[in-house]
Image: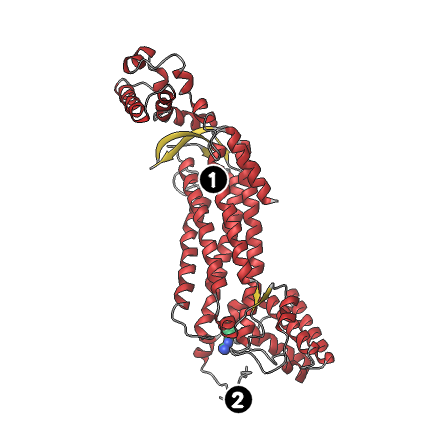
Amino acid sequence: MAKMWAGRTEGAVNQIADDFNSSIHFDCRMFREDITGSMAHAAMLGAKGIITAEEADTLIAGLEGILADLSSGALAFDMSAEDIHMFVEQVLTERLGDVGKKLHTARSRNDQVALDFRMYLRRELDEIADLTKKLVATITAKAEEYADYILPGYTHLQRAQPILFGHHLMAYAMMLLRDIDRLADCRKRMNLSPIGCCALAGTTYDTDRRFEAKKLGFDGICQNSLDGVSDRDFAVEMLSALSLLMMHLSRFSEEIILWCSWEFKFVELSDSFTTGSSIMPQKKNPDMAELVRGKTGRVYGDLMALLTTLKGLPLAYNKDMQEDKESVFDAIDTAKMCLKVFDGMVATMKANKENMLRAAQKGFINATDLADYLVKKGMPFRTAYKISGGLVAKCIRENTVLEELPLADYKAESDLFDEDVYEAISLRTCVETRISEGGTSLASVKSQIAYAKEMLK
Ligand code: ARG
């Protein structure tokens, strides 16, 4: 195909160079944004008298036709075109004749691609925020269902203190709520229009950038034309928001993988979200969680790729910037898939109350509460800590647990101990007395659930 920019050169490019230069195989996914952006541009040109109102209407109708035909499949992308922008303009000119050639007045592909990219990412960002909200709702429902199951809370992966499963699940809901907030924040800076910045310096035509911005749903315009065509911060911000989101899913995945192991058996994943082994008949593998954990690395890679592409670029547009899209598209596709599969996996996951409790009963996770018992009776914490540690050591030596140690053994260490110690160190008491805001008591977990529900409204 003859190049639209033939003139300065003859437009005859070596085949390998032409293929290398072409981006239509990935930027074709922005065709809707490219066409609606062009419709707003044509409307502005008409409104400002840069072209006639009739010409504007013809262009808009022609663009509408291309949009409909691409959407229905009646028109196929020409993979020999340089990019989506050139392809749409080429088809428009084929269909309309000379008037089609007026569309590109007072703009450049540099502001056009920046516009399309922002609009495309804005749409995907909204979809990802919705998927994340759905996952928060699923996690919150699970937290409600299993609110009062007791399990060990860990630090250093060592049993630390008893907590409620509802509390543990809600920790992930809080992370994802922050992700939703981060996406919304990123959207604010993304939602400014670069169209009208033109190649780099603005234009001599009497355009109306705010007219176009408003028509396309932007909150305002990029204030500096050089920055407008060079800025890809919004894409980097989106990739970093997605990286954090994936990191949260990955940590959750890691825990689910542990919890499904025979060593823990805290949860059982549904058969519909696990796989078997080709050789070991007993296996039920948490592949979905492992893949989410694995794909997290890939999204981090996408972020690094874009940051690295941008780091040495002088103003304004450089062709390096064509490399901005594939990494963001990949991260978007990956995050969307992960969110969907994760939602189904969590929704169908079953918790095992007995196994969680059994694990909580071992490991002396009420030792802090034993120390607190003495503190409440007037002993300084450090002294109480020491006595409790000694009693734990005694239990280990005698192969017993604090709940079953005779009162005489307690009294031998301190006469502050009484019959009520057993109630004080029962797991249910340990959990229920952690009433500080955000703590693990059932009342606190319930208010965390209520908070998440409120945030989702
Ligand atoms: N395909 C290009 C990209 O994605 C469009 C912008 C081309 N601009 C230019 N001056 N060659 O970045």
Question: With respect to residue 294, does 358 lie above or below?
Answer: above
Q: Quadrant of residue 98?
A: bottom right
Image coords of residue 169 (percent x, y):
48, 37
Of the two numbered discs 2 and 1 on the same chain, state the one appearing first in sequence. Answer: 2
Q: Which residue carries the number 2 mark?
A: 7
**Is the residue marked 1 within 8 Å of ligand 1, measured from its CB?**
no
Q: Please give the name of the residue rendered at 57% of the width and 37% of the height, measured from the top-left corner.
A: 450
From this viewpoint, which residue is outermost toward the top? 408
Image coords of residue 25 (percent x, y):
51, 69
Image coords of residue 230 (percent x, y):
48, 71
From this viewpoint, which residue is outermost toward the left? 397
Q: Nearer the viewer, mark 2 or mark 1?
A: 1
Q: Please give the name of the residue rendered at 48% of the width and 41% of the height, measured from the top-left corner.
A: 172
Question: With respect to residue 134, does 64 lie above or below?
Answer: below
Circle 2 packing at 10 Å, graded few (<14), some (14-19), many (20+), is: few
Q: Which residue carries the number 1 mark?
A: 171
Circles 2 and 1: CB atoms closer than 8 Å: no
Q: Is residue 83 visible?
A: no
Query: Is 84 or 391 nearer to us in this picture?
Result: 391
Type of amino acid at the residue the image marks with label 1: Ala
Look at the numbered disc 1 and give the secondary structure of its residue.
Answer: helix
Q: CA distance from mark 2 to mark 1?
A: 61 Å
Quadrant (top left, top right, bottom left, bottom right) of the C terminus: top right
| 392 sits to left or right of 350 | left
Circle 1 packing at 10 Å, graded few (<14), some (14-19), many (20+), is: some
Q: Please give the name of the residue rendered at 46% of the width and 66% of the height, measured from the top-left corner.
A: 324
Q: Is residue 240 visible?
A: yes
Query: Is 114 or 204 nearer to us in this picture?
Result: 204
Residue 311's mark?
Answer: none
Image coords of residue 107 (percent x, y):
58, 78
Type of amino acid at the residue the image marks with label 2: Gly
